[in-house]
């Protein structure tokens, strides 16, 4: 089937607006990850789900960032009151199991620009 | 704290020349190490992982625990190898820590 799908691909938000980014993982994948990638840098971990449980949210930069995966499939990353420093590519990834070393499949990313 | 360092932002070689992309890490335990590649206008994808000791597209990487390095090597670079390469460390099933990437350009 299809790979990890993210929407919207591109989003321009005015400073202070709320945004929601969606991730459809590969069907049946247990683990789901969100990463933030600023220009010229590598992806930085935001949060990790195993099924519907959010096991690690240590990378969320502030309480304006919130992620959920209520039914253990689709996930949404929400950013409230966006700031210019939130401008980045937001990458979603999934893997079939919760085991270390398992292949992680990335989506194409959602490019967020805050103006 | 875990950290991955890729000292070269840009690397340029001629077709047929050997190429080595450097990666150094800091982690107190025994991590899983990976190389990811991103070709132009494509998504990030796994190239290889140290645990499987495989060779993908002619690339190999050896984990050197003494030097805490996981350099990526290919004896004869091809133009289609031009891409962004990221080294990553994953201590457990959760988060991975990525380096800032090296852009490889293989000139004809």
Image (cartoon, coloured by chain):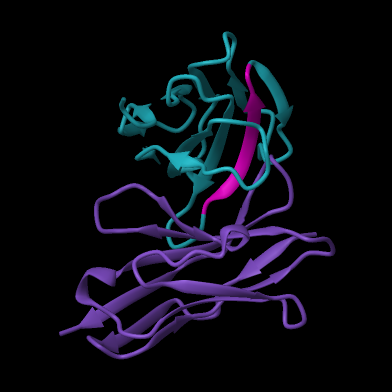
B56 lies above or below A80: below
Residue A28 appears at what percent x and percent y?
49, 20
Closer to us: A82 or B97: B97
B104 or A15: nearer the eye?
A: B104
- Tally the marks: 0
Q: Residue furthest right?
A: B28
The part of the image, by quadrant, that contains residue B55 is bottom left
x, y (%) of residue B5?
A: 61, 72
Question: A52 above or below B12?
Answer: above
Q: Residue at x 66, y 36 (%)?
A: A60
Foreground residue, A70 or B46?
A: B46
Q: Position of residue A75 (x, y in %)?
A: 51, 20
Location of the C terminus of chain B (image quadrant)? bottom left
- Magenta part of the chain: A43-51
**Colour displayed for chain A in the image of the structure:** cyan
For chain B, give the colour: purple
Residue visible at 37% across and 29% down in the picture: A6
Q: Position of residue A57 (x, y in %)?
A: 71, 33
């Amino acid at each position: 089937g299809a790979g990890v799908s993210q929407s919207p691909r591109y989003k321009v938000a005015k400073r202070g607006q709320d945004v929601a980014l969606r991730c459809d993982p590969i069907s049946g994948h247990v683990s789901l990850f969100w990463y933030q990638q600023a220009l010229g840098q590598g992806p930085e971990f935001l949060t990790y789900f195993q099924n519907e449980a959010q096991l690690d949210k240590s990378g969320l930069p502030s309480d304006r960032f919130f992620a959920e995966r209520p039914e253990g499939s689709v996930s949404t990353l929400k950013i409230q009151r966006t700031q210019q420093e939130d401008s980045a590519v937001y990458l979603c990834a999934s893997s079939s199991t919760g085991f270390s070393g398992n292949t992680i499949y990335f989506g194409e990313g959602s490019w967020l620009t805050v103006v | 704290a875990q950290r991955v360092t890729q000292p070269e932002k840009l690397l340029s070689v001629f077709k047929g020349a050997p190429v080595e992309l450097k990666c150094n890490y800091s982690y107190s335990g025994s991590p899983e190490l990976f190389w990811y590649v991103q070709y132009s206008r494509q998504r990030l994808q796994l190239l290889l992982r140290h645990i499987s000791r495989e060779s993908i597209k002619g690339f190999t990487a050896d984990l050197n625990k003494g030097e805490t390095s996981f350099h990526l090597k290919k004896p004869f670079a091809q133009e289609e190898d031009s891409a962004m390469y990221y080294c990553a460390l994953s201590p457990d099933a959760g988060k991975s820590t990525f380096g800032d990437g090296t852009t490889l350009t293989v000139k004809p």
